[in-house]
Amino acid sequence: MKMSWKATAILPLPAILAHNIYSARGLAVYSTRTINSFPHRKGMLRPNLSIAGSQCPSFLQPDTLMLEKRLSPMKTRSSRRSFLGSASAAALGLGAAALSSKDAAAQAAPSGPPVAFQPITAEKLAELLQAVHQKPGNKDLVDGKGTAVTMVLTNEVAKAAPEFEYHQTRDHIFQILEGEATYYVGGTPKNPRQTKPGEFLCPDSEGATAVTLKKGDYFFIPRMTPHKRVTKTNVSFVLISATTA
């Protein structure tokens, strides 16, 4: 049977589907690496029919070359049956994958916020501030249940933290509402100890920086930063903490 061969480009379809599509049309699909590995025997490429290297047009990319040959009608019909079988299997596979993706997306979609939104008005904050003035201490604004954020209102009178603390998974933002306080921040922890997972204390932090905050100031302290607070007179502040893994 006389065969004629020529190189041409094909669309970048999946390899098995592309092979069957073009086999059904009387075509055989190969990569340039496969072509170059053919032995020069009867029925295969002759040495003077190489289509790789300098004879390969620049727009033909590796793995997107094919050899076209004329096949007998019987072989063509067989190839068509093979193509239809593979195409059906591919369609079924794509359908199953789509359903699987849809199910996964439905399972991953959140049903709603874990907690209700909570406005804190200026009037409400002033009311709570008056309460902590009467009895110094802490008042939860956001308690962290169902969320990674806490907000705490604190009033402190003539108090100094005995040790530095730092946290592996928590960041702090302080907002000073009234009064002032001095924070000692950073440096190298001396003789640190872990009090519970992710929480550390140390008696001193060598090279710590003193930062004095007054009404209206904000202060951000990132995780793993040693810090402690010293209040000489009185201070009221809001502490926002975010905890992430």
Image (cartoon, grey):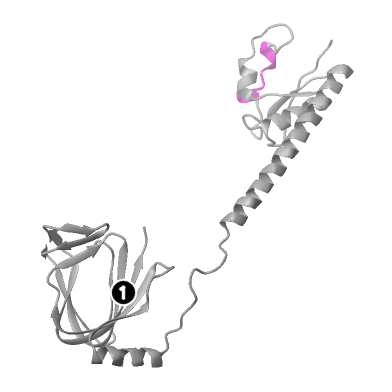
Looking at this rendering, what residue extends furthest in the right direction? 73
Q: Mark 1 points at which residue?
A: 173
Residue at x-position 31% and y-position 64%:
170
Disc 1 residue type (three-letter):
Ile
Q: Quadrant of the C terminus?
A: bottom left
Regarding mark 1 in the picture, which secondary structure is present there?
A: strand
Residue 81 in the image: x percent, y percent? 83, 26
User: In the displayed image of the protein, which residue is found farthest to the top?
Assistant: 42
Answer with the quarter of the image where residue 140 lies. bottom left
Rendered view: 239 above or below 90:
below
What residue is drawn where x is 28% and y is 59%? 168
Image location (x, y in percent) of residue 6 = 75, 23
For the residue pair 116 and 87, the one nearer the viewer reads as 116
Q: Residue 48, can we see it?
A: yes
Looking at this view, is 201 or 12 the one in front? 201
Which residue lies at the image location 20% right of the left edge and 57% below the top edge?
Answer: 194
Query: Is residue 80 one of those drawn in magenta?
Result: no
In the image, 216: left or right of 208?
right
195 sits to left or right of 122 = left
* In-front residue for pair 21/154: 154
Query: Is residue 9 something that shows in the picture?
Result: no
Stretch in magenta: 47-55
Query: What main secondary structure does the magenta stretch of the protein show?
Result: helix
The image quadrant that residue 123 belongs to is: bottom left
Q: Position of residue 138 (x, y in %)?
A: 27, 81
Q: Magenta span has 52?
A: yes
